[in-house]
Amino acid sequence: MSGGPRNHVIDLARALSVLVVVVFHTLLYRIVLTDAGPTLVPWAAPTWLYPLSWVLMIMPLFFVAGGFAHALTIDRMRREGTSAGHYLASRGRRLIGPLSVFVTFCAVVFSLAAWAGWLDAASELSRLLMQLLWFITTYLGIVVVAPGAVRLHDRFGVLPMLVLAALAAGVDAWSFAVDRHELRYLNLMFVWPLVHQFGIAHQRGWWRRGPVWVPWASILAGAGLVALLVFGFGYPPSSVGFADLPIANIQPPTLAMAALALAQCGVLGLVERTGVLASLPPRVEGALGVLNAVMVSVYLWHIPLIGLVGGVLAVVAVMDPVSAPLVLSPAVLAVGSLLAVAVAVPWLGRLELRMIPPLGPRQDTTLAVLAYGLLAFGTLLVWLTGTVVHPSRPGSTLGVLAIWVGSWIMGRAADRSQQLTRE
């Protein structure tokens, strides 16, 4: 974000949204010792935790923060007359480092396993791990439509939100009517852009300024709509899936996520009005800035790191079965995983930073569009098919290659002056 002092409320919301995801994913499975050795057991949360899942579900805040940041960026573009090439290159190149390093690492590991004879197992495990990329895929799409989204908001206000909400409700109704949850993946085009639209409205002052009843009304309306959808229309009672409730409201998304985001925007507005985070000590502000800078890396690497920590704890438990109840407890896994993330991500961040191409004074718009399209297409394929590079896995092979080629082209597009110098 630029164009003025950083908004610490938004920065904190964005950072917390990723940290909560890390902690939650440590709770999805339990490691237990059986006669066959350490075994993963999916966690079936008690039903009394379902209401709490809505309070702790702050993933929508990341899309709110994205809308807030895009509104500032696009305002600056208007003032400076920035080209589309500059916009796509400046946004796309930031993902090249974390995305290319993560995908390349996974491609090497799983492809070696596939070529060594474990093709099916490597493909399936890779595909499951790459489910994380639903978020990156969705965000890449939102970046493309963000300039139009800001213009629509400035011209029509709440109308685009109502249209997106109606479309999301229609997808939900269709999905529930035919009992096919996969249809709700269409809501990636409606629910998260709607939440992103809330972020634009938040930057424009809808909840931060004006009558104080507005954020309170948003909190009541959002919470009330969630309750109505769950108790009145049969939506899943939890925001996230568990072993006995694998399909809930977050993935694929339902209208309930947008309702939750509406309530959260009200909370953000009330917090900002207090001024409690208006000024932070330099060290705290610096730490918050660093956390925001590496949050994509945290998001991408936390599952492998949780697996690594879980594996180490399982070995310790096997060697000392008496300590197993403590060593394999969810609290130890959560703390260990957070420590692993804190140690590994700064090192990974330095590697990823070297992979981010510099943004020069001039950009090649044609190459930027091509590179961004390849990155988006490759990320979509990898999300759906994994990272195995093998003749019998054309989808994942093409996806990995598209990310590699898109990253290389984006480097050329981001600094056209270097091309002109070489020519």
Image (tube, rainbow, N blue to C red):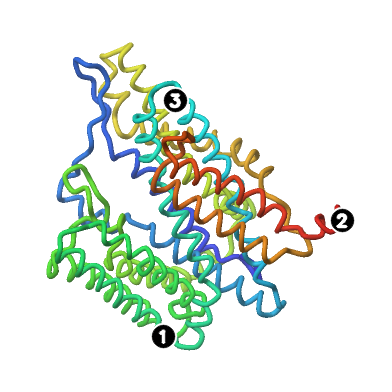
**Of marks 3 and 1, the one in the foreground:** 3
- Relative placement, left or right, of 297 versus 422 is left
Q: Secondary structure at mark 1?
A: loop
Quarter occupied by residue 211: bottom left
* Quarter placement of the N terminus: bottom right
Residue 115 in picture, x, y percent from top left: 46, 25
Direction front: furthest residue: 391
The amino acid type of the residue labelled 2 equals: Thr
Q: How many marks on residues?
A: 3
Q: Earlier in the sequence, mark 2 or mark 3?
A: 3
Give the Cα separation between the discs numbered 3 and 1. Answer: 60 Å
* Comparing labels 1 and 2, the label whose residue is closer to the camera: 2
Mark 2–mark 3 Cα distance, whole angstroms, equals 43 Å
Residue under circle 3? 113
Q: Position of residue 4 (x, y in %)?
A: 65, 71
Q: Position of residue 97 (x, y in %)?
A: 61, 46
The residue positioned 23% from the left and 55% from the top of the image is 248
Q: Is residue 218 left or right of residue 408?
A: left
Q: Callout 1: few (<14), some (14-19), or many (20+) C-alpha neighbours within 10 Å?
A: few
271 displayed left or right of 289: left
Circle number at residue 421: 2
Q: Which circle marks residue 211 in the picture?
A: 1
At label 2, counting other C-alpha atoms closer than 10 Å, the crowd grade (few under 14, some 14-19, many 20 or more) is few
| Mark sitting earlier along the chain (3/1) | 3
The quarter of the picture where the C terminus appears is bottom right
